[in-house]
Image (cartoon, grey):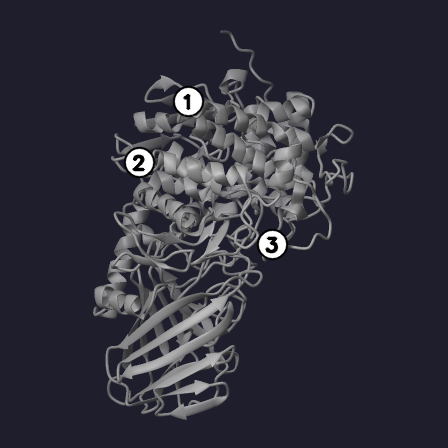
Amino acid sequence: MHRTPRPRLRGPAAALAAVALLGGVLTTGATAQAAPRTDGRLTDLVNPFIGTQNEGNTYPGASVPFGMVQLSPDTGHNTGYDYGEDHIRGFSAVHLSGVGCGLGGDLPTLPTTGDVTETDYAKYAAEFSHDDEKASPGYYKVGLKTGIDAELTATQRTGVQRYTFPATDKANVLLNAGQSLHKTLSSKVEILDNRTVRTAITGSGFCQDTKPYTVYTVTHFDRPFTTSGTWNGDTVTEGTKKSSATDARNGAWLRFDTSKDRTVEATTALSYVDAKGASLNLRAEGGRSFDRVERAAQRSWEDRLEGVKAQGGSDELRRTFYSSLYRSFLAPNVGSDVDGRYTGWDQKKHRAKNFTYYQNWSLWDTYRTQAQLLSLLAPRESRDMAISVLRIDAESGWLPKWGYGTVETNIMTGDPVTPFLTNAYQQGLLKGYEEEAYRALKKNADGVPATDSAPVGREANVEYLKDGFAPYIKDREHAKPGDSDYDHGASATLEYALSDGMLAEMARDLGHDADAARYEARAQNYRKIFDPSTGFFRARDAGGAFTGPVDPAESEGFHEGTSWQYQWMVPQDIPGMVDLIGGKDAANQRLDSFFAYDKLLADPAKTAREVWVNGPYAYYNADKYNPQNEPDLIAPYTYLSTGQPWKTTDVVHAALTLFTNGPTGMTGNDDLGTMSAWMVLSSIGVFPVQPGTDTWGLSTPAFERVDIKLDRRYYPHGSLTVRAPGASDTDRYIQSARLDGAQQSRTYLTTDDIRSSRSLSFTVGSEPSAWGTAPEDAPPALG
């Protein structure tokens, strides 16, 4: 069929766009043609300090992929480390990358010299300078101004520290069990012998009080200490072996003589089960020197990063890309001990058989990007992660929303677990568990947790199932700790409808046709909150009347966003949403306004930083794209459905300029790898435009070539190569695409396409083309 070419940019506008776009994220043609780098390691490109300033809330310390332990310095920021601080309170064993509230920070450990007199880590904190600090995957080192060097590395369940003291007979190591980033409810410390200390720390909280959880630790030193003691409150005692405290400072101190041998090494093992579990983990993973552990940690990261080989691109792009890839593998985290035991959400001990149990579920964030990236690059672990989520349902009676350790926090709203699990199903990760997963998802989609249980689930489901929308009810008393869907009725409705659409696909695949029809109808509930008088989504009250501000740039009724930002979050039916707002021309006009497209073409980097982004937590009351928050992550790909796919590339590559190789180089909170995974996927040019399905939207890659290693158990060819020869600032528009040599006019792939193909190749040019502009080229509506 003959296709009429779309209008092209010409004259000054084309010149400005060609020169300005990406602000240097893509390389010039000459550089892009350079030979691939063969020097050094991919881990050398990773900068763990990215995101440690301006509320990126990442951590620079040591861990291994998906490790239980994240040994990292805490400087006083509520989530751990802030690059703007100059004192370290301790090196604690638990951190999550990019969370928005205090969490973890258990057992901050600090080396000191002299008498032990202070028990508050804010007072005994050690000053440091970034000039004496360095980090790489699996390793961290800092020189403290007390004259002590501290080095950190990790195994899966242990953190290893090496301290180099000045020559003194009063070299101390402080193990602080009573202070952390969360609320410490109680702690116990026991000095077992002259090399070993055991603790049990019970805490709660993540943005609010939660049910308590306990982490057990055992720390073993490579040499005996000469004396030791404990502290309780303000009282420091020498010679004591045990100390317990409730809501008070509590810890142990160990003293070494470093007059001749100045180095002290210590290994701390964790368990969320019991003290026995910590000891087993120490026995299995401890006993090696610091240097051996550090080399093994580095190898584990090199193996992960080698799964994606990117060629071309500037040094800045390569560093931000591999740093983002690194952060994408930091969570979820192993929760089971070496013997397979773990603590379930019923607070009972269980044993994982034929899988590793994982924990820490920032699902409202990760279901949009990171879950899909891991399904490609780490399918075996992703399978175990999905099974772990099913175990939460089996053991506690309900699927999670935002789970930390062994408890539900109920942070964020909607129904994020459904697209998380339907994604696992669509990617082939739930073989043998399909019906179990479906039963759990059906219960979650059709019900509400009991009032005496911790989860809130789909809190507004009674009204949603009756009326087709979650009502927005001002000042409603929260029945349970955490966020409430009633506080954000409009966005909760969109989230429920999205999940219904994804569940309908799974139900149909499994032969549950009646359910599929029911969920498919519910996926259209986004229409129930469309206000024809404004042309935007809007909250409705319990009586059904539209309520809240008429201005779609105000946030009332929407969680961390506005109607402008949420209007594109209908991935189950973009064509239907486009029709609601007046068709493709109207939608494109609105999209252009939303992205400030004319300004973007003139100066993409300035537009990204001055028009789109107005602060790390500027989620509210805006009519522009917010690339640093989850509701907008898919929005740039809406142009794939409106016949202007080249604009997706323009917007995506402008957003990539926000990722830089410095402490402020993270766009918003990383949220356990969510933003990092967005950067990786968008740089590759393959993005999950319908989270919870097997649909991947396409845009111009930021590299000339990316070789992706795939697990042959899930992807028979074992690899996929994405090529865009000559891609540059000036040549960034897709002219044509081929999948294994066959013409690919569609703007999307399916997972089956990825499984059955070896290469995806783009021809690029300096102006937009007709590629992907036909209606049949767009990602299809579900159903």
Image location of residue 80, percent across then percent down:
49, 66
The answer to which quarter of the image holds residue 523 is: top right
How crowded pointer 2 is (Cα within 10 Å; few <14, some 14-19, many 20+) is rated as: few
Q: Earlier in the sequence, mark 1 or mark 3?
A: 3
According to the picture, the residue beneath numbered tag 2 turns out to be 432
* Residue 566 higher or lower than 72, as above or below: above
Q: Which mark is residue 616?
A: 3
Q: State which mark lies toward you, 2 or 3.
A: 2
Q: Secondary structure at mark 3?
A: loop
Q: State which mark lies toward you, 1 or 2.
A: 2
Q: Amino acid at mark 1?
A: Ala
* Residue 559 higher or lower than 643, as above or below: below
Image location of residue 605, percent across then percent down:
58, 44
Mark 2 to mark 3 CA distance (whole Å): 42 Å
Q: Which mark is residue 737?
A: 1
Image location of residue 602, percent across then percent down:
63, 36
